[in-house]
């Protein structure tokens, strides 16, 4: 299968490693011609996961997303949600019906707070052409070939199974699902709650409280999922839901936890944003999810508190002291 990958950050780099290791041809859209030339000549990304080397025979570099769409059977998006639409062709009607769009985007598109598949559906792309690639899978551990699990969610079973097979390796186990919206919302919400865990850590709360915070966050997520889903038999303790929440809240690789930790220690939101070299998707998602929940009306006091701290100037200590009375 011929793949295209859009995104040259750590996650895009890790996904290219998986695909090229499995022998697939990959057209990789990166940020600049200089970066493309470096990877082409030296076979590694100097900015992210620089210890990972690629096979030159399997890899073609470009700075044009149109090249990716024209030369691939499946196009993988691995960029922050705010930048996704900048890589979409202006004429979507020209896309082949056989083309699969794979989203590793863990955020909402700013235009209307939409999931990627919702935006594509509004633009006329068939639901069957979309696969969400989600799960507790830090890029750094993929690069180190530590055992990881990825979930592939799609409406077309044969298509999602084929994509899942393409990513399976001795160190990546793949799982399939038909809960396309749910797994994407899980990836959005876990970033919001990881911010909260980071804030708690920065304020000096210990592991005991943080475990209670995360357990209650899992309950909030489940209530939200049940409010939006018609499917009643989904296991919300699965890796793509609970597992991804846990690793994002606890891991030192988590940029959202790091962002929240700075807020808890007294950094302003702007200072924390400047200090981060990578995008913390939970920051814009904290506002977007509150706007979405005005319609859904799930009970989400933790997410509400994080939103008030980040966007309305609520003192973090005051916010968490109020939360203490609500958790169980």
Image (cartoon, rainbow, N blue to C red):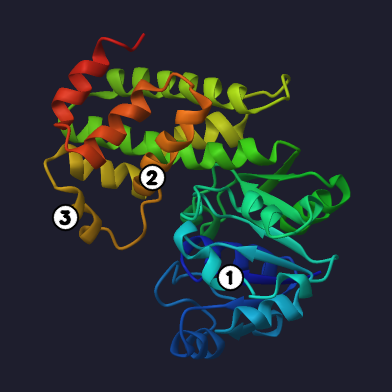
Q: Looking at the picture, does residue 222 appear above or below residue 96? A: above
Q: Which residue is mark 1?
A: 6
The residue positioned 67% from the left and 23% from the top of the image is 235
Q: Looking at the picture, does residue 116 appear above or below residue 74? A: above
Instruction: Examine the image and state in which quarter residue 273 appears.
Output: bottom left
Residue nearest the observer in this picture, 65 or 1: 65
Label 3 vs label 2: CA separation? 16 Å
Specify which label sits upstream in the sequence, 1 or 3: 1
Q: Which residue is mark 2?
A: 282
Q: Secondary structure at mark 3?
A: helix
Q: Which mark is residue 271?
A: 3
Q: Secondary structure at mark 2?
A: helix
Quadrant of image for the C terminus: top left
Label 1 vs label 3: CA separation? 29 Å
Label 2 vs label 1: CA separation? 21 Å
Instruction: Examine the image and state in which quarter residue 236 appears.
Output: top right
The crowding category of the residue bearing disc 1, from other C-alpha atoms within 10 Å (few below 14, some 14 to 19, many at least 20), is many
Q: Secondary structure at mark 1?
A: strand
Say whether residue 267 is left or right of residue 234: left
Tag 1–tag 3 contact (CB < 8 Å): no
Residue nearest the observer in this picture, 100 or 164: 100
Q: Looking at the picture, does residue 31 appear above or below residue 80? A: below
Specify which label sits upstream in the sequence, 2 or 1: 1
Q: Looking at the picture, does residue 74 appear above or below residue 71? A: above
Q: Residue 120: x and y, percent? A: 67, 57
Specify which label sits upstream in the sequence, 3 or 2: 3
Q: Residue 293: x and y, percent? A: 47, 30
The residue positioned 58% from the left and 78% from the top of the image is 29
Residue nearest the observer in this picture, 141 or 137: 137
Say whether residue 47 is left or right of residue 64: left
Q: Residue 172: x and y, percent? A: 66, 50
């Amino acid at each position: 299968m011929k793949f295209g990958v859009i995104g040259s950050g750590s996650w895009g780099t890790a996904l290219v490693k998986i695909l090229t290791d499995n022998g697939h041809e990959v057209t990789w859209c990166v940020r600049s011609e200089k970066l493309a030339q470096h990877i082409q000549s030296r076979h590694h990304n100097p900015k992210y996961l620089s210890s990972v080397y690629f096979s030159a025979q399997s890899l073609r570099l470009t700075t044009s997303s149109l090249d990716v769409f024209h030369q691939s059977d499946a196009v993988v998006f691995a960029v922050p949600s705010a930048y996704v639409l900048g890589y979409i062709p202006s004429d979507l009607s020209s896309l082949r019906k056989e083309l699969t769009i794979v989203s590793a985007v863990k955020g909402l598109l700013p235009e209307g707070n939409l999931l990627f598949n919702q935006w594509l559906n509004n633009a006329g792309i068939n639901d069957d052409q979309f696969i969400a690639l989600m799960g507790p899978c830090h890029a750094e551990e993929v690069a180190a070939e530590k055992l990881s699990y990825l979930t592939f969610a799609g409406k077309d079973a044969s298509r999602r199974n084929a994509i899942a097979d393409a990513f399976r390796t001795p160190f990546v186990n793949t799982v399939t699902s038909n809960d396309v919206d749910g797994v994407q919302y899980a990836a959005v919400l876990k970033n919001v709650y990881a911010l909260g865990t980071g804030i708690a850590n920065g304020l000096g709360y210990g592991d005991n409280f943080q475990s209670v915070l995360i357990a209650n966050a899992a309950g909030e997520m489940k209530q939200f999922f049940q409010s939006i889903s018609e499917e009643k038999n989904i296991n919300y303790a699965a890796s793509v839901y609970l597992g991804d929440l846990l690793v994002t809240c606890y891991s030192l690789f988590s940029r959202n936890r790091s962002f929240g930790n700075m807020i808890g220690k007294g950094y302003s939101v702007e200072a924390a944003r400047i200090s981060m070299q990578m995008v913390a998707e939970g920051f814009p998602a904290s506002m977007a999810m509150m706007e979405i929940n005005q319609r859904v009306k799930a009970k989400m006091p933790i997410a509400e508190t994080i939103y008030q701290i980040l966007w309305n100037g609520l003192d973090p200590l005051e916010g968490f002291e109020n939360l203490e009375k609500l958790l169980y």
